Every structure is written in structure tokens, then in C-alpha cells.
């Protein structure tokens, strides 16, 4: 990170306008360790940025961060669907960040599980790019018992979804019970898993994403909870397992 003005840096993290940050500084509410920063035009480098405190609290994640959330059922990833947005589960200030925080792909309103969010556009595109073929694993609860031929059909690379003209890439199905399976796909087509089961005469009643690449949804991350990923955790997304 090139050194930037304190007011610009904190402004882009959503702490307020330049004027508001100048007031915070004058009030002695911005610190670098023990030192009070009273000048809003002070230059801040990466080392200093990590040590900044506002109102004695460590500052929000620096630009380029990734969050994993356990998305609950009932919240949406986009304004196109009605209902509360996943962003409402994150700190309010994050909505004023520039660059903005976006979801890495989408989960349907009725789907739960592992959802990534980031302000790093290049990373976001690297993860969702069809070329990356990053595996995503879902736990699926079905309305009807399996017929028995689903794994073969999904693996064939010939399954055509309704109103599409290109077959799906091979997907893996692991049976956990007559109505409970794990499905691993490497694409991200619209409502893909639900439509795959519709194509074999079944209906998805419950869908939860458990894994993206080598990154798993932690058992202790409850629906609605989130955590900022370490660099090593982000790398796991790209590790083939
Ligand atoms: N497939 C679906 O049908 N829905 C999702 O949310 C994700 C994958």
C-alpha cells in the first residue's frame, strides 16, 4: 500500500467524510499505538495502517480483505430478490466502504452455508471465473428417494438443463441417505443444483454449501456468523482437494 492521507484512508473504510475524519482527529480519537494523530492529512503507510485505532478500537479490515459467512436461509445476496440482504449481517460501517464489499457469486435466498464476501474485485473474479473450475460442495436434502441413476447422469458431462444449450460439466454425487446427498459442482449456473435435481425428477428441499475449493464451512460458525479470513485460508480456496 502506498502511503495515503489519513482522511482518505479512513474515509474509504467508511469512517466518515474528510470533514468528519478531521473532526475525529482534532478530538484526539485517532491513535497510532499510543500516539494521538491530530492531523487528518498525515500520511499513512501499510505498517501504520494496521496499528491505527479509532476510539481505542482497532480499525476495520484493511482493503483487500475476504470474509466467510455462514449465510442463513431467508437472507438474499442481491437487491433483485426481496428480503434482508446478507450485508445487513455485517458491520453497518462496511456499507460505506470504497471499494465496496460484494458477495463472491451468490447463494439463493433459500440456500444456506459458506458465502465469501470481499472488496477485492480481482480476487472475486479469479474465484468465480468459469476457467478456475473451483469445486463447490453442497449438502442436499431431497423431497423424494433417489432413483439410483443420478450419480451416473451427473458425472456424464451430458446433462442438459432446461432452456440451456450447453451440457453441464461433470459433477460428483455422494449418497448419505435415500434423500440426503453431497453434490460437488465446478460451475455456478443459475439455481444449478436445484435444476440438476429437477432434471432427474426430484426436488431440492434443503441446500447448504459446505465447501469452496479446499475451504470448508467451520462447524462452529453458526448461521449469521462471519469471520475475516487469513491469507492462508484465502489460499485454501484455490487448493485442489
Ligand atoms: N445451486 C442452487 O440451486 N442454488 C444455490 O444457491 C447454489 C447452487
Image (cartoon, rainbow, N blue to C red):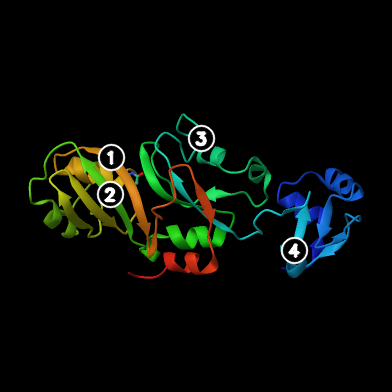
Label 2, secondary structure: give it: strand
Earlier in the chain: of badge 2 and badge 1, it is 2
Residue 199 shown left or right of residue 97 in the figure:
left
Eye-nearest disc, 3 or 2: 2
| Secondary structure beneath label 4 | loop
- Residue 225 is situated, as x and y percent measured from the top left of the image, at 49, 46
- Is there CB contact under 8 Å for labels 4 and 3? no
The first of marks 4 and 3 along the sequence is 4
Categorize mark 2 by other alpha carbons within 10 Å: few (<14), some (14-19), many (20+): many
Mark 1 and mark 3: span between their CA atoms?
Answer: 22 Å
Q: Residue at x 42, y 68 (%)?
A: 238
Q: Earlier in the sequence, mark 2 or mark 4?
A: 4
Q: Distance between the residues labelled 2 and 4?
A: 41 Å
Q: Where's the C terminus, which quadrant?
A: bottom left
Q: Which of 174 and 170 is in front in this view?
A: 174
Q: Name the residue under label 2.
A: 139
Q: Which of marks 1 and 3 is in front?
A: 1
Of labels 1 and 3, earlier in sequence is 3
Asked if the beta carbon under badge 1 is closer than 8 A to the nearest atom of ligand 1, the reply is: no
Q: How crowded is mark 3: few (under 14 residues within 10 Å), some or many (20 or more)?
A: few
Please tell me which residue lies in front, 52 or 56. Answer: 56
Circle 1 SS class: strand
Mark 1 — residue? 206
Cβ–Cβ under 8 Å for marks 2 and 1: yes
**Label 4 crowd (10 A; few <14 / some 14-19 / many >=20):** few
**Whether residue 226 is situated above or below residue 42 in the rendered picture:** above
Q: In this view, does 90 lie above or below 50?
A: above
Choose mark 4 or mark 1, whichever is in front: 4
Question: CA gap, disc 2 to disc 1?
Answer: 8 Å
- Quadrant containing the N terminus is bottom right
Mark 3: secondary structure: loop
Camera sees residue 118: yes
Amino acid at each position: 500500500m502506498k502511503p495515503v492521507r489519513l482522511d482518505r484512508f479512513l474515509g474509504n473504510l467508511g469512517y466518515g467524510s474528510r470533514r468528519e475524519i478531521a473532526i475525529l482527529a482534532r478530538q484526539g480519537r485517532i491513535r497510532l499505538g499510543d500516539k494521538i494523530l491530530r492531523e487528518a492529512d498525515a500520511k499513512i503507510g501499510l505498517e501504520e495502517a494496521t496499528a491505527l485505532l479509532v476510539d481505542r478500537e482497532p480499525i476495520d479490515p484493511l482493503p483487500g480483505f475476504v470474509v466467510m459467512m455462514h449465510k442463513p436461509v431467508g437472507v438474499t445476496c442481491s437487491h433483485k430478490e426481496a428480503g434482508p440482504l446478507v450485508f445487513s449481517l455485517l458491520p453497518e460501517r462496511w456499507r460505506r466502504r470504497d471499494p465496496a464489499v460484494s458477495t463472491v457469486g451468490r447463494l439463493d435466498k433459500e440456500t444456506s452455508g459458506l458465502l465469501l464476501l470481499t472488496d477485492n474485485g480481482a480476487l472475486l473474479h479469479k474465484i468465480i471465473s468459469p476457467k478456475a473450475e473451483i469445486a463447490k460442495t453442497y449438502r442436499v436434502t431431497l423431497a423424494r428417494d433417489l432413483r439410483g441413476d443420478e450419480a451416473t447422469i451427473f458425472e456424464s458431462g451430458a446433462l442438459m438443463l432446461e432452456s440451456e444449450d450447453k451440457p453441464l460439466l461433470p459433477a460428483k454425487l455422494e449418497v448419505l441417505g435415500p434423500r440426503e446427498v453431497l453434490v460437488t459442482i465446478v460451475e455456478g449456473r443459475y439455481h444449478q443444483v436445484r435444476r440438476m435435481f429437477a432434471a432427474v425428477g426430484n426436488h431440492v428441499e434443503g441446500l447448504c454449501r459446505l465447501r469452496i475449493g479446499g475451504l470448508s464451512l467451520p462447524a462452529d460458525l453458526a448461521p449469521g456468523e462471519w469471520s475475516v479470513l487469513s491469507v492462508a485460508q484465502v489460499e485454501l480456496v484455490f487448493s485442489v482437494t
